[in-house]
Image (cartoon, helix red, strand yellow):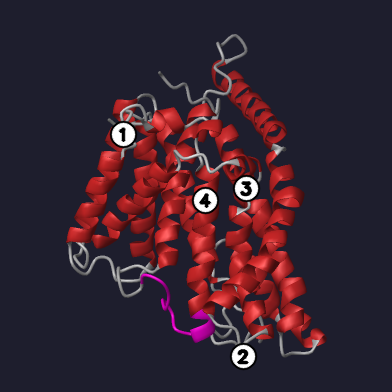
């Protein structure tokens, strides 16, 4: 008989292989994009003829489900809201900013057909930086960069998902402020409300247009919410091959139906959780210490465009292999030189924000109630969960 295992049993870092699964998902995105890079046909890749979503979008679902689990755990551990917000910002923004600047001011000049003076004089160069770092869009162009590639002029399309992840972080951070993170019952109530809104909106034809930003927000936030729900139910959330078989069966039965997309997130997310129970030897220990998944994701498309520009004769598999040869060292440098040092600043910045918030609340209460009033400094930042 299979030993009863729950998600709660896997949440300690040394007991799960989430790092392996994130790295595998990042690699799947690269493999999927290699087919598009070589052919110039959007969505032309593995699984395209089998499911509604290509391999890369299944991988993105894995990212969002695992992110929901880990970010909910981060929120639970955070003593104050500033600690949580600082952790989320430092995990994404420094690495993203360095990637954007290197793309605009190093890769762009090398792969544009313009003269360097014209490239740096173009407003488009600086608009790319502003639009991409602000998460306004992931499809901002650079002047005549990659213009002769099969996927012409597309600089770093995968960054379009980052804004949805940031919105999910923000919405989750609101729950403590409105009293919905105090206990599991309130947390489940909030998630049930999101599910109700999702079903209500998707059930009415014409509200959400296929391929629109709203559709992607609902789809990706649902995957993230599934991860949060799995975390909330972690001590009752079974990790079982029989549950996996059941989820897979339901997914197959409803393939091609209007509910395939949300079911694909359920299936991909649960499969990732199930596979995370295995040890994978030294590889798991390494991925738990060195997280290359973000670097692979944010630099992947840019490197792939560079590879196809230099070696246009490569087929999809050879293109993916060449990409990884170049990309893995770049992702390692991003982790060791940017992402990891940035994460080390969390305690310092969070303490500074806490101190500023405490002083601001104390000064406000002193003005409102007089010098003899009882202060509750920092209350706005405290999350005060009940366990």
Mark 1 or mark 3, which is nearer the start of the sequence?
1
Mark 1 or mark 2, which is nearer the start of the sequence?
2
* Number of numbered discs visible in the structure rendering: 4
Quick one: which residue is furthest to the front in this view? 1
Tell me how far mark 4 sits from mark 1, CA to CA.
Answer: 21 Å
Please state if 191 lies on the left or on the right of 253 as rendered: right
Q: Quadrant of residue 120?
A: bottom right
Instruction: Check the picture and name the quadrant holding the N terminus.
Output: top left
Q: Which residue is mark 2?
A: 148
10 Å crowding of disc 4: few (<14), some (14-19), many (20+): many
Tell me how far mark 3 sits from mark 1, CA to CA.
Answer: 27 Å
Q: Which residue is mark 1?
A: 238
Please state if 228 lies on the left or on the right of 361 as rendered: left
**Label 4 close to label 3 by CB (< 8 Å):** yes
Q: Is residue 174 magenta?
A: no
Question: Residue placed at 44% from the left, 84% from the top?
Answer: 41
Instruction: Check the picture and name the quadrant holding the C terminus.
Output: top left
SS class, disc 3: loop
Question: Residue placed at 25% from the left, 48% from the top?
Answer: 245
Please state if 199 lies on the left or on the right of 276 as rendered: left
Mark 2 or mark 3, which is nearer the start of the sequence?
2
Tell me how far mark 2 sits from mark 1, CA to CA.
Answer: 50 Å
Percent across and percent down for residue 142 are 65, 79
Q: Decide: is 294 above or below 228.
A: below
Q: Quadrant of residue 135?
A: bottom right
10 Å crowding of disc 3: few (<14), some (14-19), many (20+): many
Q: Which residue is mark 4?
A: 22
């Amino acid at each position: 008989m299979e030993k009863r295992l729950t998600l709660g049993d896997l949440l300690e870092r040394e007991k799960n292989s989430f790092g392996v699964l994130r790295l595998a998902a990042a690699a799947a995105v690269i493999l999927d994009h290699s087919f598009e890079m070589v052919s110039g046909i959007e969505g032309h890749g593995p699984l395209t003829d089998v499911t509604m979503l290509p391999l890369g979008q299944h991988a993105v679902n894995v990212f969002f489900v695992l992110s929901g689990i880990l970010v909910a755990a981060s929120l639970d551990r955070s003593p104050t809201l500033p600690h949580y917000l600082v952790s989320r910002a430092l995990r994404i923004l420094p690495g993203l900013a360095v990637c954007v600047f290197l793309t605009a001011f190093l890769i762009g000049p090398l792969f544009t057909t313009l003269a360097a003076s014209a490239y740096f004089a173009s407003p488009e160069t600086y608009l790319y930086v502003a639009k991409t770092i602000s998460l306004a869009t992931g499809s901002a162009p650079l002047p005549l960069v990659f213009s002769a590639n099969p996927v012409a002029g597309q600089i770093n399309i995968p960054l379009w998902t980052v804004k949805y992840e940031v919105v999910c972080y923000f919405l989750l951070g609101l729950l403590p402020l409105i009293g919905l993170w105090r206990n599991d019952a309130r947390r489940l109530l909030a998630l049930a409300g999101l599910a109700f809104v999702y079903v209500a909106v998707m059930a009415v034809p014409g509200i959400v247009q296929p391929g629109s930003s709203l559709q992607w927000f609902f789809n990706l936030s649902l995957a993230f919410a599934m991860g949060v729900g799995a975390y909330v139910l972690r001590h009752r959330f079974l990790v079982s091959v029989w549950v996996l078989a059941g989820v897979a069966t339901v997914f197959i039965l409803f393939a091609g139906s209007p509910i395939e997309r949300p079911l694909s997130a359920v299936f991909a997310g649960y499969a990732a959780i199930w596979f995370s129970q295995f040890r994978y030897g030294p590889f798991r220990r390494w991925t738990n210490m060195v997280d290359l998944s973000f670097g692979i994701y944010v630099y992947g498309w840019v490197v792939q465009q560079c590879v196809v520009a230099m070696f246009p004769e490569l087929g999809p598999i050879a293109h993916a292999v060449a990409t990884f040869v170049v990309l893995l060292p770049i992702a390692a440098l991003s982790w060791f030189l940017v992402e990891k040092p940035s994460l080390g600043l969390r305690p310092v910045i969070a303490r500074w924000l806490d101190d500023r918030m405490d002083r601001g609340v104390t000064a406000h209460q002193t003005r409102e109630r007089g010098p003899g009033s009882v202060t509750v400094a920092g209350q706005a930042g405290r999350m005060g969960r009940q366990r």
